[in-house]
Image: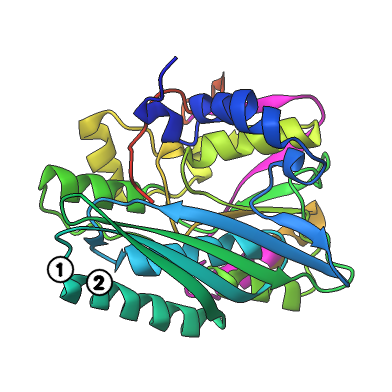
Amino acid sequence: MKITMAHGSGGKTSAELMESVFGKHFKNSVLDKMEDAAVLDINGKVAYSTDSFVVTPVIFKGGDIGKLCVCGTVNDLLMMGAEPKYLTCGFILEEGLEVDTLDQIVASMAAQAKAAGVTIVAGDTKVVEGSGGLYINTSGIGIIPEGRDVSAGGCKPGDKILLSGNLGDHHACILSARMEIENDIKSDCGCLKDITDALFDGNIDVKTMRDVTRGGLGTILNEIADTSGCRIELEEEAIPVDEEVRGFADILGLDPLYMGNEGKMIAIVPSDQAEEALRLMRDTEHGKDAAVIGQVKEGNGTFITTRLGGSRVLDVLYGEGLPRIC
């Protein structure tokens, strides 16, 4: 078998690669949980995460690879209930990259880090032959406050599932740029700290959080259902999608449930706190279009009730999806 672009999709093929190669050799009790960030006990609980960013184009409507890499790593820490503190960054620069472009991207990283309340404390740069591109790896550390326990296995039957906003904006933005399609679609690239702060400051008992990135909502909810040993049921009518993005997806035969995002998250909370959690999310910049989209039940698997009232299995993404969206 050879590596294909499907191995980077975040879907079933990616999961198979993780299990057959990385999981086989790196197996341990921390990594095996396959969370957005590792939770480590170092004089208290800390979250640690690393991610690499290879988006094409590197500058797009609503952001750039610099903003993306800071938000992406910070969001992974946030999803574990952590307070992000420090980032490192590693750059691989291809020969021919414009210094002005690099300067713009690094300035964007600095601005986003300041906005997110994190400090970039170490880095590395390598230059390789190529055609003027660049790739960035970021790692992050955050402190998990005492008593806060958020994990993919934390949800229970009866819990409600909240989505912070419209699906597919980033995926549609990047694909539009690559196909040279003119529209008003912007990436949702953003830091979700305003939402997580609102939920925890509002004393919401958050069971599970995940940012909805590669593989889309369908893939992420399948992972949560498997980890928690529960059945997840969604209401298609309740899932928010911008009309321009929906039209774009329809034309290209894409499903917003599997489209990537860079500024959306789900939160799973107790049923009796769902209304208050929704209000808190909607009062934030990044959660103004939030909705309750489903619930957790006994059983297994992930299902969706369609607009016509039928029910179908919602499987994980299989195949390529869209490469290089993050």
Q: Amino acid at mark 1?
A: Glu
Place of residue 208 in the rendered image (x, y in percent of width and height, measured from the top left): 73, 52
Percent position of residue 238, x then y: 52, 45
Along the line of sight, which residue is nearer the eye, 36 or 258? 36
The residue drawn where x is 52% and y is 41% is 217
Q: Is residue 56 at least partly visible in the picture?
A: yes
Circles 2 and 1 in contact, beta carbons < 8 Å: yes
Percent position of residue 178, x then y: 17, 46
**Residue placed most toward the observer, 211 or 311:** 211
Q: Quadrant of residue 223?
A: top right
- What is the quadrant of the N terminus in the image? top left
* Residue 74 quadrant: bottom right
Q: Is residue 3 left or right of residue 75?
A: left
Q: Residue at x 29, y 72 (%)?
A: 105
Judging from the image, what secondary structure is the residue with disc 1 in? loop
> Residue beneath label 1, please?
98
Q: Residue at x 51, y 30 (%)?
A: 14
Mark count: 2
Q: Residue 124's spot in the image, x, y percent?
A: 44, 68
Asked where in the image residue 254 lies, by quadrant, the reply is top left
Q: Which residues are magenta?
A: 277-306
Q: Is residue 313 magenta?
A: no
Residue 297 lies in the magenta-colored region: yes
State how far apart marks 2 and 1 are (Cα): 7 Å
> Which residue shows up at 56% across the image and 83% down it?
117
Compared with residue 105, is residue 314 higher up or lower down, i.e. above or below? above
Residue 314 appearing in the image:
no
Residue 228 horizontal side relative to residue 282, left or right: right
User: What amino acid is labelled 2 in the image?
Assistant: Leu
Q: Is residue 310 left or right of residue 41?
A: left
Give residue 102's mark: 2
Q: Mark 1, residues whose alpha carbon is within 10 Å: few (<14), some, or many (≥20)?
A: few
